[in-house]
Image (cartoon, rainbow, N blue to C red):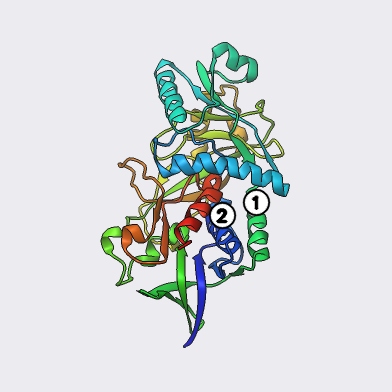
Amino acid sequence: MEQFQVECLVIGAGVVGLAVARELAKQGKEVLLVEQESGIGMQTSSRNSEVIHAGIYYPKGSLKAELCVRGNKMLYQYCLDNNIPHQRAGKFIVAKNATQEVELIKIHKHALENGVEDLRWLDKNQVHKEEPALSVNAALYSPSTGIIDSHAYMLQLQADFERFGGQVVFNTNLAIKHIDKEGVTVELLGQNAELKAKYCVNSAGLEAVNLLQDVAEFPPDQLPTAHYAKGSYFSYGGKVPFSHLIYPVPEVGGLGIHLTLDLSGAAKFGPDVEWLDTQNLDEFDYKVDPIKAKKFEQAIKSYWPSLEGEKLIADYSGIRPKISGPSETSADFMIQSEQQHGIRGLVNLFGIESPGLTASLAIGERVGKLLTV
C-alpha cells in the first residue's frame, strides 16, 4: 500500500470545508482538500435557501450566534471584494396574531443580545405600506439579511484556495484508520493508498459523525449522535408581489416555510422539516413529494392569502446534518478540538447546518486559530 504525507487534510469540499481549507492555505500551510463527489458543494451546500442570515434567532453566547454575526459581515465584504452576486434584500419576520407578536418581541431581544442591532419593528400599517400583499399583525424587519449566489461564492473560495497553493481532489472516498500523536492516518478507499496528516479537519457534513464511528482511538463519549432532517422546497409558477424575504415565526427544527427570492426575483418556498428515520446516507431520497403542496399552501396563505396554490411546483430538497433529535432543543454548532477530545491536530465540525453558509468564513477563521500552534 502506497503511503503519502501532508501537513493538513480537510475532508469535505462543501462551503464550510472550502472556507476552512482556504484559511489554512492562506496561512501558508500545505493543504489537501478531499471530496467524495465530482465537484464542490454538491450535497448540503447546493440544497439550501442561499440566504445570508443576520444572526437573529440563536441563543446568546452560542457558536451559531457568534459565528453568524461575524460571518455576516465577513461574507458581505468578501462578496464586494470579489464581485460575487448578492443582494441585501432584507427580510420580514411576520406575526399573524397577538401570540406571535409576543414571540417576535422575544426574537428581537435575542437579536439584540447577539449583537444584531439594526432590526426595526413594523406595525400592521407599516407592513402594509412596504408589502401590501402581506396579511399580518406586525413584523420585524432585518435589513442585513440578504441573498447570495452560493455557487459563485464556492467557486471563489476554491479559486482562492488553489491560488494560495492548496490542492483539491474529487471522486475520493476515505476512511479514518488510525490516530496517534503524529497525526491522523486515512485510507483512500479503492486506491491502495494511505495518507497521513499532521492536521485533519473533518468537515464531512452529513457523514462527519460516521467518519469516526469505528475509530478505536477516538473517545466514544465525544461523538454526538447524528440526526437528519429533510427540507423540501417549492418554486412558484408566477410573479410574486414581494421585494423582501418573508419568514414566519420559527418552528421546532427550522425557521418555518418561508418565502425567499433568488437574484432574478423568482420565489421559492420552504424548507419544511421532515425528520428521517435512517442513518444510512445511501437511503436518502431527495425527491420532493408533490402531495406536500397542500401543506405548503396552507402555511403560506397564513401570511399571503392571495397565493394561488396550483402554481406551487415541487422543486428540490436538502438534508440538514443535525446532532439533536426531533424532541430535543436544537443543538449548537460543535467545533471540536484537542481541548474536548484530547487528540492533537484533529478538528471535527459536527452539526454544521444553517447558518453554516453565512458563518462559513468565520468558521474558517476559528478553525485556523485552533490550528495555528
Write down the quadrant of residue 71 in the picture: top right
Name the residue: 55% across, 26% down: 118
Q: Amino acid at mark 2?
A: Val
Give 295 or 159, whichever is nearer the viewer: 159
Q: Is residue 349 left or right of residue 23?
A: left
Q: Vertically, is 285 above or below 198?
A: above
In the image, what residue occupies the spot 26% across and 59% down? 221
The residue lying at 64 percent from left, 32 percent from top is: 89
Q: Is residue 192 left or right of residue 87?
A: left
Quarter where residue 165 is shown = bottom right
Other residues around mark 1 within 10 Å, as few (<14) / some (14–19) / many (≥20): many
Q: Residue furthest bottom?
A: 1
Residue 336 location, quadrant: bottom left
Whether residue 50 is visible here, answered yes or no, is no
The residue nearer to you, when weighing 11 against 303, is 11
Q: Position of residue 27 (x, y in %)?
A: 57, 62
Query: Residue under circle 1?
Result: 153
Where is residue 57? Give x, y as percent.
45, 34
| Residue at image mark 2 | 15
Query: Considering depth in this image, is 217 or 308 the residue closer to the camera?
Result: 217
Q: Position of residue 67 (x, y in %)?
A: 48, 44
Question: Dots 2 and 1: beta carbons under 8 Å?
Answer: yes
Who is closer to the viewer here, 259 or 312? 259
